[in-house]
């Protein structure tokens, strides 16, 4: 790999200081929300989260130091390594509530599935950037590698089981492939075969499996499980009103209605205490971040950079949209965390690494 | 390093970002709108619901499946237990409440410490489990002076026969953390009762059923105003055992207070008809929640009441093992039927003397008489010829040294020594002198009563080594069959029909012929076949009365009727002395009860 062609002064000049400020604001909001949950639950989540934040910042900075072309060179190795981790978690993982998701490293345990999300993005970006898609888009043959790259980790994650992460991987790579473009007749063929497959599947499935899928799509059908979580979550968000109940004044958190109020349902706790003002503020922060991300895609210096940036933007988009959509009762209940808000070390660190990569692509863009 | 041909600017991709932007705004628009709808349009309504957390979840536990014997007699059921519970958030005056409760309930109620956990103020706390009827009545009458207090009806596990069959049925206990972590979230909760041992544990998933519940809206005082959603619980499935309660009771009575085990099995299909392990414990104590002292007494009792001696007790099989040595010698051509060997009072190998149990010896005898008279010195000679590894091969073929695979938990494999095993464990070579005790079922050899029984069942049924089982059927509440046990043949014993017949014949002789060691198991009118055993606990046998813990274990294993065996029985009495005097009469009672069942009332 060639030496970094960018002098330090130019790198610093092209560093997005305002976006960094936005990021700090977001992380701060996350700590505030976690502090509230910590108080009501009596567990100091925010402290541990703060240590993970520091760890993430170190990695964030570290990633900025190297040209992102290194990611391209080592893309498939990174990918293979993350697959290895996923296999390891199935073999030696720590179980919790029937799911094996954690690898115990002694001093802390982490979720390889989070790493897998990023490694899929890198591997796909590397593959797609090598294709010439300017005319017609990807052919069926060119879709084989992306399909394998996607489904290997997806299946490994799904058997943990971690449905949320599996879906995220599917959506990210789906959007990256669509971004690259697919040949018209291939796209139509795939769509048609999926559509014709669904009724067939429905015939094959057993009754209880159908029930599960229906309850997944419509939580109302499972009033004791996800349906109850959703109604309590909606009450939490709704009762916040316009101004919110105030910091540490939320009441819904006291009830044990959500198994994951510090992780997947953190937004409902936040919205209850800070109301419409708070939720719109938070949502706007995410929107600004994503808009900037798309701008990074536009100005990327090379095809790999553009695909990489796009993958990272969809990473953040799908997490934000699915998580908040679920909490406010728009989407099925799946375990997808909210970036920089949800408690969870692995995800926070990986989110910061992803941000670091986005900043990296942005810093090393072309100047006009 | 690869040179990238695609370093050119991604102009085509750049143009696509416009469409991405449109999508992004669209999706975020939906989120903004929805949040506005929840917090502004519906804000007041949700605010009302959030006051006092109006919507609560009430769990409806499913009735746990019952357990029956083979004839449909209830062995484990459920009965209502009235529990005193408390919702902390609804309590106004803690001190007053405590005083009033102590007046109503003799001995008062323990709830110091409960108040401090303010994390989950709406979770009902259990104050007292399984209240007496009068207590329930007194609480109900004074309900209005006791805000926050309520009586919950919970189903409690009930074992009508108490200590009987406890080791098979198992017991219940509160779910532990480790198990809670292993299961999917929502399947179990803290404080749930789960099967901890035996059938209760192994069939937990079938017995448990599926939880139901209600989503209810409550008023400010915590009273249910209306039910919003309801899901009916699905009851657990019923289990039918192969156990015959009548035979079980006979076996228990026959063994009495002695420590040991009795198992009866149908040698044709591996169904366990009775399984006794003594001393036993009362699983009802576990259902109610056991105090520390009772638990400690159970754990520290030297007679190990918690252990299922039928499958967990490992003892030298003693003379019951001689049939294996005999089968090996016949198959390997070391002895032929009719060949006579001199079997004196002792056998000398090198400078060691190996005694026979009979002081005057047996003279010249063939293999039939050797089994009938249980001649040690005869089998020493066979063992020496065979060598330990060949004995081990046949022992394993008869199911020794491996678990039988019965559908109960905690089964032990026993031990069959080989040269290799000794090298690994003791790092020493095998000495010939060590083969001799093995040939007569002593030495390093260890077996569970079930293994011994299963080996004899194979002799009885013509050489089929079966997998014993205690669960016959599983049915749902409506009586539909969910599971039915099938006969499972694990292996075939590598012994010819002719040689098996010789051994079988000798076992009949041991009970019925003159000079047989098992004559105390003889039943007039029925052909019983079987073998006694006396397992040495310490090497020395002389010296008169030994203290209890050094006395020999007493064995008997047999089957009947000889022509077409329907029942096989094993009896082991810990420190019971001679097999013929202690174990054989017990087995006799069980076999007799089985063979005469149906016209029993007249004959007894």
Image: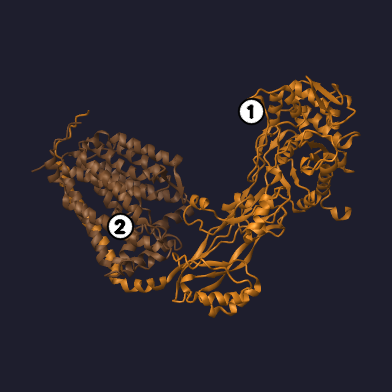
Chain colours: A brown, B orange
User: In the image, is residue A311 above or below residue B108?
Assistant: above
- The secondary structure type at the circle numbered 2 is helix
The residue furthest right is: B514
Which residue occupies 31% across, 62% down? A270
Q: Quadrant of residue A91?
A: top left
Which residue occupies 57% across, 68% down? B110
- Where residue B314 appears, as percent x and y from the top left, is 70, 39
Which residue occupies 22% across, 28% down? B1
User: In the image, is residue B229 above or below residue B196?
Assistant: below
The answer to whether residue B66 is visible is no
- How many labels, in total? 2
User: In the image, is residue B573 above or below residue B173?
Assistant: above
According to the picture, the residue beneath numbered tag 1 turns out to be B426
In this rendered view, identify the residue nearer to me: A45 or A30.
A45
Q: Residues within 10 Å of mark 2 (few under 14, many from 20)?
A: many
User: In the image, is residue B404 above or below residue A288?
Assistant: above
In the picture, the quarter occupied by the C terminus of chain B is: bottom right
The disc placed on residue A31 is 2
Is residue A80 toward the left or the right of residue B77 in the image?
left
């Amino acid at each position: 790999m060639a030496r970094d062609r960018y002098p330090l002064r130019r790198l610093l000049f092209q560093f997005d200081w305002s976006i960094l400020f936005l990021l700090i604001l977001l992380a701060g909001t996350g700590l505030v929300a976690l502090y509230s949950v910590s108080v009501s639950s009596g567990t100091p989540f925010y402290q541990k989260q703060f240590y993970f934040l520091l760890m993430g910042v170190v990695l964030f900075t570290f990633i900025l130091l190297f040209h992102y072309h290194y990611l391209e060179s080592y893309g498939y190795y990174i990918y293979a390594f993350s697959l290895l981790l996923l296999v390891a978690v199935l073999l030696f993982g720590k179980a919790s509530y029937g799911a094996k998701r954690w690898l115990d490293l002694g001093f802390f345990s982490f979720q390889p599935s989070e790493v897998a999300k990023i490694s899929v993005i890198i591997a796909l970006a590397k593959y797609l950037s090598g294709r010439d898609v300017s005319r017609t888009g990807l052919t069926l043959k060119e879709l084989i590698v992306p399909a394998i790259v996607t489904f290997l980790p997806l299946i490994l994650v799904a058997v943990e089981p971690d449905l949320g992460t599996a879906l995220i991987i599917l959506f990210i790579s789906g959007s990256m492939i669509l971004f690259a473009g697919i040949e018209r007749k291939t796209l139509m063929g795939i769509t048609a075969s999926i559509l014709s497959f669904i009724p067939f599947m429905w015939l094959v499935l057993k009754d209880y499996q159908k029930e599960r899928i229906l309850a997944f799509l419509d939580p109302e059908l499972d009033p004791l499980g996800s349906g109850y979580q959703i109604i309590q979550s909606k009450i939490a968000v709704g009762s916040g009103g316009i101004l919110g109940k105030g910091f540490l004044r939320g009441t819904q958190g006291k009830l044990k209605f959500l198994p994951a109020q510090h992780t997947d349902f953190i937004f409902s706790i936040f919205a209850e205490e800070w109301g419409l003002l708070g939720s719109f503020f938070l949502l706007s922060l995410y929107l600004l971040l994503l808009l900037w991300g798309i701008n990074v895609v536009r100005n990327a210096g090379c095809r790999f950079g553009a695909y990489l940036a796009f993958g990272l933007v969809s990473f953040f988009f799908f997490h934000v949209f699915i998580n908040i959509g679920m909490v406010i009762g728009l989407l099925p209940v799946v375990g997808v965390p909210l970036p920089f808000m949800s408690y969870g070390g692995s995800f926070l660190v990986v989110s910061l690494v992803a941000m670091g990569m986005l900043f990296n692509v942005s810093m090393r863009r072309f100047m006009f | 390093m690869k040179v990238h041909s695609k370093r050119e600017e991604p102009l085509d991709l750049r143009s696509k970002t416009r469409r991405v932007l449109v999508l992004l705004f669209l999706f975020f628009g939906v989120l903004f709108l929805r949040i506005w709808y929840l917090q502004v349009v519906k804000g007041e309504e949700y605010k009302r619901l959030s006051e006092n957390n109006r919507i609560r979840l009430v769990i409806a536990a499913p009735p746990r499946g019952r357990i029956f014997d083979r004839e449909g007699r209830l062995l484990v059921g459920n009965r209502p237990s009235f529990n005193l519970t408390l919702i902390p958030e609804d309590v106004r005056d803690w001190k007053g409440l405590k005083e009033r409760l102590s007046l109503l309930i003799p001995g008062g109620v323990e709830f110091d410490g409960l108040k401090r956990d303010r994390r989950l103020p709406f979770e009902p706390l259990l104050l007292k489990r399984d209240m007496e009827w009068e207590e329930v009545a007194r609480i109900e009458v004074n309900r209005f002076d006791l805000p926050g207090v309520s009586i919950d009806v919970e189903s409690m596990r009930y074992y009508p026969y108490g200590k009987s069959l406890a080791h098979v049925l198992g017991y219940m206990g509160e779910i532990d953390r480790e198990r809670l972590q292993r299961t999917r979230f929502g399947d179990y909760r803290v404080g749930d009762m789960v099967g901890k041992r035996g059938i209760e544990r192994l069939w937990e998933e079938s017995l448990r059923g599926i939880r139901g519940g209600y989503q209810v809206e409550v008023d400010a005082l915590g009273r249910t105003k209306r039910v919003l959603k309801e899901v009916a619980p699905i009851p657990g499935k019923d289990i039918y055992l192969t156990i015959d309660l009548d035979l079980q009771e006979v076996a228990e009575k026959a063994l009495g207070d002695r420590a040991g085990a009795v198992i009866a099995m149908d040698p044709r299909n591996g169904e366990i008809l009775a399984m006794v392990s003594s001393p036993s414990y009362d699983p009802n104590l576990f259902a109610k929640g056991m105090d520390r002292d009772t638990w400690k007494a159970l754990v520290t009792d030297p007679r190990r009441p918690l252990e299922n001696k039928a499958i967990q007790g490992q003892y030298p099989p003693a003379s019951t093992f001689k049939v294996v040595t005999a089968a090996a010698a016949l198959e390997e051509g070391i002895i032929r039927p009719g060949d006579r060997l001199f079997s004196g009072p002792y056998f000398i190998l090198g400078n060691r003397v190996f005694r026979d149990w009979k002081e005057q010896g047996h003279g010249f005898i063939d293999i039939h008489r050797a089994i009938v008279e249980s001649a040690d010195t005869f089998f020493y000679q066979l063992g020496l010829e065979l060598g330990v590894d060949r004995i081990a091969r046949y022992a394993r073929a008869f199911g020794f040294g491996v678990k039988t695979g019965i559908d109960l938990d905690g089964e032990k494999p026993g031990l069959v020594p080989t040269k290799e095993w000794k090298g690994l464990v003791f790092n020493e070579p095998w000495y010939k002198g060590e083969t001799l005790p093995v040939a007569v079922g002593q030495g390093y050899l260890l077996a569970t009563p079930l293994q011994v029984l299963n080996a004899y069942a194979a002799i009885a049924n013509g050489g089929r080594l079966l997998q014993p089982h205690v669960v016959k059927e599983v049915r749902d509440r409506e009586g539909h069959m969910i599971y039915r046990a099938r006969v499972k043949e694990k292996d075939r014993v590598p012994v010819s029909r002719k040689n098996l017949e010789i051994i079988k014949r000798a076992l009949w002789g041991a009970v019925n012929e003159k000079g047989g060691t098992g004559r105390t198991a003889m039943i007039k009118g029925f052909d019983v076949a079987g073998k006694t055993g006396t397992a040495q606990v310490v090497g020395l046998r002389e010296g008169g009365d030994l203290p209890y813990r050094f006395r020999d274990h007493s064995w008997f294993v047999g089957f009947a009727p000889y022509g077409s065996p329907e029942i096989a029985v094993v009896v082991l009495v810990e420190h019971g002395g001679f097999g013929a005097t202690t174990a054989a009469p017990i087995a006799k009672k069980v076999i007799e009860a089985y063979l005469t069942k149906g016209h029993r009332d007249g004959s007894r």
